């Protein structure tokens, strides 16, 4: 009994000394106002993920027809690429790297820049044996959904960091 208590106390002391801490919730500045998400594609899954994340962070959703006085998170471009990274003895690709790159910017309603245009790139590697075409498709689809979710999180973290540490930049 004493050894368990001593182990628990020791583990707690080690974890508190290592600098580990949970991420704070995403917070947006109060003066940002209503936010709309624009994407290059009308029905972008990434734009939907971003809009949901912004609402969870406390942002007001802007009406669809509002164009002035509304902050805009704009997804300028989304690019996907599959690159073969290994081959079998017959020269068929066996392993791929799936890359996802997004360029975005965030502007206030007065057109001042909150987050300047920047790119975020994520990638995942996956195995795709040439003879297992069904498994290849399903694994890739899972990775696409995972990368979209991770991309939305990465963009929202950059928005959070920029709004906490920088004043608006005018162009």
Image: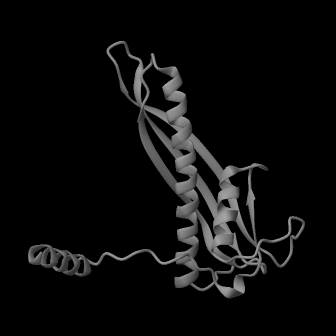
Residue placed furthest toward the front: 1
Q: Left of 64 or right of it: where is 167?
A: left
Residue placed furthest toward the right: 65
Q: Quadrant of residue 17?
A: bottom left
Q: How many marks do you count on the picture?
A: 0
Q: Quadrant of residue 118?
A: bottom right
Q: Residue 10's spot in the image, x, y percent?
A: 15, 78
Q: Residue 57's spot in the image, x, y percent?
A: 63, 75
The quarter of the image holding the C terminus is: bottom right
The correct choice, above or below, for 36 with respect to 49 in the image is: below
The correct choice, above or below, for 71 with respect to 75 in the image is: below
Q: Left of 106 or right of it: where is 139?
A: left
Q: Quadrant of residue 138?
A: top right
Q: Residue at the spot x=49%, y=28% of the render? A: 136
The correct choice, above or below, for 104 with respect to 34 in the image is: above
Q: Left of 28 or right of it: where is 35?
A: right
Q: Nearer the viewer, residue 57 or 165?
A: 57
Residue placed furthest toward the left: 3
Q: Residue 147's spot in the image, x, y percent?
A: 53, 49
How has the structure been colored for display? one colour
Q: Residue at the spot x=57%, y=64% of the render? A: 155
Q: Residue at the spot x=58%, y=51% of the render? A: 148
Q: Residue at the spot x=64%, y=61% of the render? A: 104
The correct choice, above or below, for 125 with respect to 43 in the image is: above
Q: Residue 123's spot in the image, x, y percent?
A: 46, 46
Q: Nearer the viewer, residue 78 or 31?
A: 31
The quarter of the image holding the N terminus is: bottom left
């Amino acid at each position: 009994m004493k050894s368990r208590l001593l182990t628990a106390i020791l583990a707690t002391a080690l974890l508190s000394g290592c600098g580990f801490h949970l991420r704070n919730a995403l917070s947006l500045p109060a003066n940002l106002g209503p936010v709309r998400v624009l994407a290059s594609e009308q029905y972008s899954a990434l734009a939907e993920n971003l809009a949901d994340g912004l609402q969870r962070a406390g942002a007001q959703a802007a009406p669809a027809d509002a164009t002035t006085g509304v902050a805009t998170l704009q997804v300028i471009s989304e690019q996907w690429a599959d690159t073969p990274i290994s081959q079998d003895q017959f020269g068929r690709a066996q392993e791929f790297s799936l890359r996802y790159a997004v360029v975005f910017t965030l502007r206030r309603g007065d057109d001042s820049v909150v987050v300047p245009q920047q790119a975020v790139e994520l990638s995942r590697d996956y195995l795709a044996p040439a003879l297992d075409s069904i498994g290849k498709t399903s694994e890739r689809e899972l990775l696409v959904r995972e990368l979209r979710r991770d991309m939305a999180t990465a963009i929202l973290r950059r928005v959070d960091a920029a709004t906490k540490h920088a004043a608006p930049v005018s162009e």
